[in-house]
Amino acid sequence: MNTQQQVFRQALIDMLPALRRYCRALTNDSHNADDLLQASVEKALARWQQYQPGTHFERWMYRLCRNHWIDTIRTQADNEEFEEETMSQINASDTEQQVISQMALQQVQAKISSLSEGLRMVLYLVAVEGCSYQEAADILEIPTGTVMSRLARARAQLIAAD
Amino acid sequence: MKPIDDTTLSAYSDGELPTDEAHAVAAALATDPELQQRLQQLQSVDSAARSWFTQGDDEPLPAGLEQLILDKPMEPARVVPLPRRIPLPAWGLAASVVLGITLYMQQPEPVSPQIQQFADTARTGEILEGDGWRAEIASSYENAQSERCREIIQHTPEESITLRACGSPGDWHWQINNSDNAYHTASGPEEANRQLLPEEERQWLNGH
């Protein structure tokens, strides 16, 4: 077997747990996440030549995966969550009245699933994967300033009153 | 100093503020209990997020996925058509130079607006599908004259064409080479002095 292909296949296998977590964050649904994972793997194998050795494999995979998800959503004509202007707005003055000690962890977690995709993904990449703002911006193909503002909105939304 | 909002506080928490701004926030935090409380609130979200996003990590991966990765046939390593080779003429070097110039004949607007726009914005590896053709950004590089260029391969059922755009997004000069049956691996064009890193390419295309 071709060595380059072997290296690519192994990198893909090694990344499966993280990629599945990313798919779950993206889809907000474990069933859709597994479908997306499978489709992303197949697409990566079909397009492996587009990956430039020496560059960040994970970021390449995350972009491929997200682009596929966006295509899927567009096909289903159900993409409101991808539009920045449709994202739920945070009323900062309201959120400032809240005290986190009064909130149960479960309440915060329940709210995560209700975050829009744009907010959820920056929170995931920075808080869970430990990405820098620049890395998250590269993966999501958005400006760094947008990462910064979305992240603050995600955090504020999660500690906001119901 | 302007009020410290959630965006600034959140970026401070992540260590993403410039040094002088971070110092200003730290100074404000030292004297403002409400600001301290707000910072703690914002930080508390992350542990909940980590717990929520990783809750399915222990579940087994979909059956057969690893085997699919190991078994699925893959295309061979990418090949890029070489420029057409001209046999060295017996009548001297000067004539071959003339032929070489002809080979790399520059054309002012030789490509479609679609391709031009593709060269302006697409990252390496991206593909554009047209009516009966398909184009791919093969690389971004700096040539020996320190000029930044992009190599685009355009495939039709009949042939593959190598397009080289040098200059800057929106202001390219183009070179076109038709392919023949000779191939080389995709290590970039021969004139490439240095391949651009992905981040360099991104900033270049974004006009930074």
Image (cartoon, coloured by chain):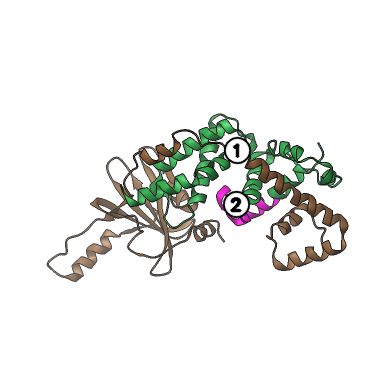
On-image quarter of the C terminus of chain A? top right
Q: What stretch of residues is rendered in magenta? A: A131-149
Name the element at disc 1.
loop
Q: Nearer the viewer, residue A90 or B48?
A: B48
Foreground mark, 1 or 2, reads: 1
In this rendering, do the residues under marks 1 and 2 share a single chain? no
Confirm whether the magenta stretch covers residue A144: yes
The residue that mark 2 highlights is A136
Q: In percent of the image, x 69 and y 57: which residue is there? A: B14
Badge number at residue B45:
none
Q: In percent of the image, x 83 and y 53: which residue is there? A: B37
As shown in the figure, which amino acid type bears the numbered disc 2?
Answer: Ala
Measured as percent of width and height from the top left, residue B104 is found at 30, 60
Confirm whether the magenta stretch covers residue B195: no
As shown in the figure, which amino acid type bears the numbered disc 1?
Answer: Gly
Q: Looking at the colours in the rendered structure, which chain would you say is drawn in brown?
A: B
Measured as percent of width and height from the top left, residue B139 is found at 41, 56
- Chain of the residue that carries numbered disc 1 in the rendered image: B
